[in-house]
């Protein structure tokens, strides 16, 4: 009943009122505190991995107890040839898989984001399925095919599989970016007598480039990390996750923590560089709202 | 020539046809790859699931061997049900844990938004096998967590977490949390703030504004989060292998053993088919229940 009266008396500060009310709530700290705790929970195993790479254990296998600080494992991290080879396999496969999957996924994302064509819904559905289906189904179906084709399992089959599961992720990343971009920019370029190809190259490509880079990163990380699908199609070849999984039964050597830490640092640095390069050129072209097609 | 185009709007048919040709040209390489390495393998797996024979008895032959499905599932219901219930607990756990944080980041993250999102993605930079092994150390009977609690006398000396469903579901929740948090964040971040202001203007209190505006509008995110957690978690077997014991085996462990250890390809393929078809069925029922088919596409669009 007095609401209008109160609103009337407080004409001036009305825009600040909700903000101040929010600041005074005693419960206002719950959510930020919770968010911080959740972040801590997410990084706990990472911190464990880093810390236990410095663990001065008496034997060769990691224990739950922390014995003391040592740099020994950093010195000896490449001493086990099978582990070194596994890491090398992982990195090479991840680079090649990302390099192949990115153009394949980018063109697919462009087709879905910019054009209408018959069968578009079906293609979208297949991409969605490829992302959502359990990895074990992808792995076992690929193994079924390779067995039927009598293809020898190893480097090539792992690579083919990694490209296959990366393409959908690159495609959805690029599609989101394409859908978010302002088509009138490209129309304007064409109105200014740019050919469609030139308009694409000079206008569209720079705008969607952050999406392509994000897709590239995603493909690289997914490939580097993959265990389940790789386990099905790897045969005797070992990647880093396969090696680690095999070693869990007898216990992990701390050099695994060291190599994991180095891969982690390299990945984070790479991601931050990508983010910084995007901020430099892409901030004004950021997609605001995906209008959908 | 281009000048003529600008005069003749709407575009003439020739350009439409060329656009379509460009679309198919762009579609072909990636779509072809998915056809050969995703769709064809699924069909070959279906084909394999109806074969008979063995590696040692002269190979496999296609004989419409439907009994493989009976074989595969006999005595295995417990693993299927366990996988579904573990995945359900994982889904509820991740969404409940992720929603408040995603909400806070989307509405109050401010200039920390990108940093916080990056923090959520941080686990992706460590191999998930290694992450899971770290939980094995953290949760070990005399590890940093339980050891301390036992020293303090908070839990009894014979208390253990490893090899129990708690450890497996805990590991699953940890590994799938980012999958749930990201779509939730995207959905919450997209919500038009003026709608919430409008609710306050219409005298809604904070709870009402959340229940009537924010939560319904975040449903596509909840849908995507549950899907992206439940489906992969059902087929997962790494957490069950590393953190679990004999009593926590999931359907994925069985498929893996049948395929890679026992080389019983037809039975293994049949199990994998059952898993896939169950997931497709549940997903479409869920999509129907929660809204239209568009939701599926909206989720895929994230």
Image (tube, rainbow, N blue to C red):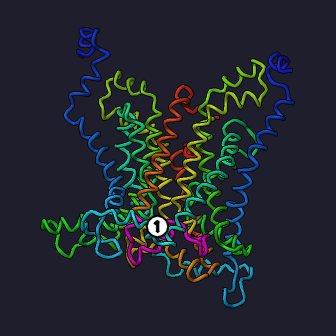
Above or below: residue A255 compared with residue A170: below
Q: Which residue is mark 1?
A: A78
Q: Which residue: 57% across, 83% down? A: B262
Q: Which residue: 66% across, 38% down? A: A113
Q: Which residues are magenta?
A: A231-256
Q: Residue A102, how many percent across, how many down?
A: 64, 48
Above or below: residue B217 compared with residue B270: above
Q: Chain of mark 1?
A: A
Q: Residue A17, how many percent across, how many down?
A: 27, 19
Q: Residue A258, how many percent across, how many down?
A: 40, 61
- Of residues B242 and A134, the one drawn nearer to the viewer in this rendering: B242
Above or below: residue B200 compared with residue B291: above
Tag 1 secondary structure: loop
Drawn side of residue A137 relative to residue B109, left or right: right
Drawn side of residue B2 relative to residue B241, left or right: right
Q: Which residue: 83% across, 35% down? A: B18
């Amino acid at each position: 009943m007095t609401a209008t009266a109160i609103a009337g008396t407080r004409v001036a500060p009305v825009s600040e009122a909700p903000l101040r009310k929010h600041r005074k709530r005693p419960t206002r700290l719950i959510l930020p505190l919770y968010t911080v705790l959740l972040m801590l929970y997410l990084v706990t195993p990472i911190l464990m991995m880093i810390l236990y790479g410095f663990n001065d254990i008496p034997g060769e296998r990691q224990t739950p107890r922390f014995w003391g600080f040592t740099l020994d494992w950093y010195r000896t991290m490449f001493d086990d040839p099978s582990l070194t080879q596994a890491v090398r396999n992982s990195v090479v496969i991840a680079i090649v898989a990302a390099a192949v999957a990115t153009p394949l996924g980018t063109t697919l994302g462009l087709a879905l984001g910019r054009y209408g064509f018959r069968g578009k819904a079906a293609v979208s559905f297949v991409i969605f399925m490829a992302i959502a289906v359990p990895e074990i189904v992808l792995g076992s179906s690929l193994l079924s095919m390779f067995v039927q084709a009598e293809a020898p399992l190893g480097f090539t089959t792992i690579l083919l599989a990694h490209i296959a599961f990366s393409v959908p992720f690159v495609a959805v990343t690029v599609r989101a970016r394409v859908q978010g971009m302002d088509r009138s920019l490209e129309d304007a370029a064409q109105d200014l007598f740019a050919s469609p190809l030139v308009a694409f190259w000079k206008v569209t490509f720079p705008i969607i480039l952050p999406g392509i880079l994000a897709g590239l990163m995603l493909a690289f990380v997914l490939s580097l990390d993959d265990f389940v699908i790789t386990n099905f199609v790897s045969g005797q070849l070992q990647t880093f996750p396969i090696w680690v999984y095999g070693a869990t039964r007898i216990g992990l050597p701390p050099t695994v923590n060291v190599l994991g830490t180095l891969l982690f640092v390299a990945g984070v640095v790479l991601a931050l560089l990508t983010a910084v390069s995007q901020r430099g050129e892409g901030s004004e072209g950021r997609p605001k709202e995906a209008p959908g097609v | 020539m281009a000048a003529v185009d600008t005069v003749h709007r709407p575009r003439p048919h020739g350009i439409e046809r060329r656009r379509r040709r460009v679309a198919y040209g762009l579609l072909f390489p990636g779509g072809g790859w998915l056809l050969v390495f995703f769709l064809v393998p699924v069909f070959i797996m279906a084909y394999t699931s109806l074969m008979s024979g063995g590696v040692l008895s002269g190979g496999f032959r296609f004989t419409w061997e439907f009994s493989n499905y009976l074989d595969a599932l006999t005595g295995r219901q417990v693993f299927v049900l366990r996988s579904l219930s573990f995945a359900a607990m994982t889904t509820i756990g991740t969404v409940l844990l992720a929603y408040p944080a995603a909400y806070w980041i989307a509405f109050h993250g401010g200039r920390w938004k990108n940093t916080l999102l990056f923090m959520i993605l941080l686990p992706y930079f460590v191999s998930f096998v290694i992450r899971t092994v770290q939980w094995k150390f953290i949760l070990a009977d005399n590890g940093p967590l339980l050891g301390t609690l036992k020293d303090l006398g908070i839990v009894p000396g014979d208390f253990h977490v490893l090899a129990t469903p708690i450890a497996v579901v805990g590991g699953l929740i940890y590994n799938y949390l980012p999958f749930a948090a990201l779509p939730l964040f995207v959905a919450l971040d997209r919500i038009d703030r003026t709608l919430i202001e409008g609710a306050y203007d219409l005298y809604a209190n904070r709870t009402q504004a959340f229940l009537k505006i924010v939560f319904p509008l975040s449903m596509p995110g909840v849908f995507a989060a549950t899907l992206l957690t439940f489906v992969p978690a059902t087929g997962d077997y790494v957490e069950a292998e590393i953190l679990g014991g004999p009593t926590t085996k999931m359907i994925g462990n069985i498929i893996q053993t049948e395929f890679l250890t026992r080389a019983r390809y037809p039975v293994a393929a049949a199990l994998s088919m059952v898993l896939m078809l169950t997931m497709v069925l549940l997903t479409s029922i869920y999509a129907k229940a929660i809204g239209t088919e568009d939701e599926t596409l909206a989720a895929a669009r994230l």
